Image (cartoon, rainbow, N blue to C red):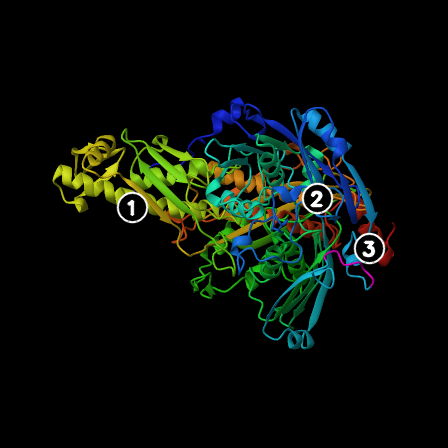
Amino acid sequence: MIETRSVGRRVERVDALSKALGTAAYVEDIQVPGMLHAALTRSFSPHAVVTVEEAPARSAPGVEGVLSSATIGTVAPGGPSFDPACHDFERDPAFDPQPGDFRLFDRRVRYVGEPVAAVAARTRKEAQAAADRVDVRYRPLTSAVSIEDAIAMDAVVIHDSISSNIADTFRVATGDPESAFAGADRVVESGFDTPRQKQCQLEPTGCLVIPATDGRMEVWTSHQSPHRARSTLAHLFSIPETRLRVVNPEIGGAFGKADALTAEPYALALSLVTGSPVRLVFSRTEDFVGTEARHPMVAEVAMSLSAEGLITGVKARCRVDWGAYRSHSPRVLRVIANQFLQTYDIPNADIEVVGVFTNTPVAGAFRGYGGPQSVFALEHMMDVAARSVGVDPLAFRKRHRMRDGVPWGPQGRPLDLSGFDETLRVASETFGWGDSTAPPPESHLRRGRGMAMTSWKSGIAGKPGSIDLSGATVCLNRDGTVDLRVAAIEMGTGIRTTLAQICADTLGVAVGSVRTVPADSAATPFDSGANASRSLYRCGQAVMAAATKARDRMLASAADILEVDAADLTVADGVVFAVGAPGYGISVADLARRALMKGVDIVETAYTEFENAPTYAVHCAEVDIDIDTGELTVNRMLAVQDVGTAINPTIVEGQIEGATHQGLGYALTEELIVDEGGVLVNGNLMDYTVTYAGDGPTIEVQIVECPDPTGPFGAKGAGEPSIMLPAPAVANAVLDAVRVSVTSLPLTPEKLLAALTDRNSDEGLPV
């Protein structure tokens, strides 16, 4: 049994001081002698064949290199297609082209803002001026900027390699849903509409490429999966992977935005053609159009219920806007479908999700990865169904939650729902579910309460065609300190700190003596990336395994030195000593030095097991609605989540609070709007309405700890579940307050007032 001295404690983050003082170095902070600056020329047309003339840019002051469709072949022979999501090497066969893959500077552009040329110059201002001088001529093609336009019978096909704009269809069917609906006592159904949402991370997207003296190319980037990025970039430019080094500097937030190639290919291409270091940093407007956003979805959902008030079946028909290219969309499609069946024991289901190409900016990875769309629809339908049979929404959920003991995960181990039950209990008691609420302060206000719950996974182990692997190397130094080499991406999650805590307690040393080496494809073992609530769970597994091996080596070496059986030794506070005789021992520093003198270097590497852990979350919301204006105020938001073990409670609470805040933005204000011409109307922080810290209530966070045997010290993933629940919890509170079901996000005053007006008109009430 390993004694925990830092795990479970509020250890200060290792990067806290540098970020508080502003000394942390991000891509835009790094200065390199001879560095050029890059800028992109972007399309003004949503769909066209383009002809590019580079000469006006080449003659501009300070320009050192220009690339477009006419010249890209000099550095990317054959102009191969690639997957921006960097899953190319996971395909079978590897790097097999798929419809909707991206090409650098294709002669056909498919959305407003697609890059058509790239310029490198001595200053950023000169680069942008030259990019503006690139002569682009357009032969317009008919465009489809909405799902309806794209699937119309006469729609122009956006990608010639397929016969329509239907990019993919994924269907999950269980039991006999047709019989369930045919024999139902009642059926409830509704349509749903969820918006594009932008990550709005603090750091603008950027990349710095440095040609190294040994012939390698160093790519400094905020990418969330450096090993995957290296494979795709090597494929794209026909470079051996050993010549590419992908490194993470500090990252100012990502939330999925940086899980796709954006600036990297262009900076690398310009560096290859000029032979100089090149940095490309997007403007904030470019960040909106040039990086991926959450997928918009429209859906029709129906539930069948028995005379006893039990759900007998569910049907869903969802259409998802992929934007112009493929990227993460096929996997998001599958998450949307599967999440309808993740939480409840519904015997008969038919879930169909259709992906559609449109002439709009690319949709891709965003925290929750499809979960917020389907959870919003499912959880609101749970309240609608509960009210239709006169059952309390909490009791209705308890009645239908997934069954204990069903095979779950890649190993098919029996599902243990004790964490779910405890999360529900804590949420209902903390929120006072079922207690009477105080009336709103004014007569034109109506008060309501709502809840939502979900189950999620820690990582993607078991998903077909996916690699879910993390490695870690533990190196014991001669002074007793430890280098922890792991490609865990620190993007605000505190992962370097929590992994150091896991390593320190496993080895028996102080957490301050462990240094977590930043992700570097040339120095850290393979990692699938920071996504899918996997970093702490999967990287933590690898760290604990590697540290355990290193600890065993330490004890074996100490046994030889102390002439004591290794089984009788332990490690604590940086000292290896005999159990029961703490005065007889050797410091870890002295042990490392003496072991090395005997030819033993205590360096151990280990990888994750093929496992997964379920996570559970419940949110409760209280709202007031002004029936005269439709204005919605969230008075209270409670987020309760089972995290297995809170390695660092402060960091876990921050993750849950941040996810909940993002979820409130999705619920109330955020919608990236594309007009009929394919142009982003509000693609900037002035017009895109992000919720700020003072815009909502103080988010109450309650951690539930039901350790999972597969996680490091029992920990599970924690980063994503809480982004999925604010929207349905608030929508359900609206339903409770005014008996109106509003199913289009965001829940703006205009939508709420229109729904109230329709309800009053239908009921003959004064409008």
SS at mark 2 in the image:
loop
Residue 116 lies in the magenta stretch? no
x and y percentages locating residue 132 in the rendered image: 76, 32
Q: Amino acid at mark 2?
A: Ser
Q: Residues within 10 Å of mark 1 (few under 14, many from 20)?
A: many
Residue for badge 1 = 549
Horizontal arrangement in the rendering, residue 587 relative to residue 240 (left or right): left
| Gap in angstroms between the C-alphas marked 2 and 3 | 56 Å
Which badge, 2 or 3, comes first in the chain's sequence?
A: 2
Q: Quadrant of residue 298?
A: bottom right
Res 669 seen here: no
| Residue stretch in magenta | 154-159
Q: Residues within 10 Å of mark 2 (few under 14, many from 20)?
A: many
Residue 69: give its label.
Answer: 2
* Sequence-earlier tag: 3 or 1: 1
Q: Which mark is residue 759?
A: 3
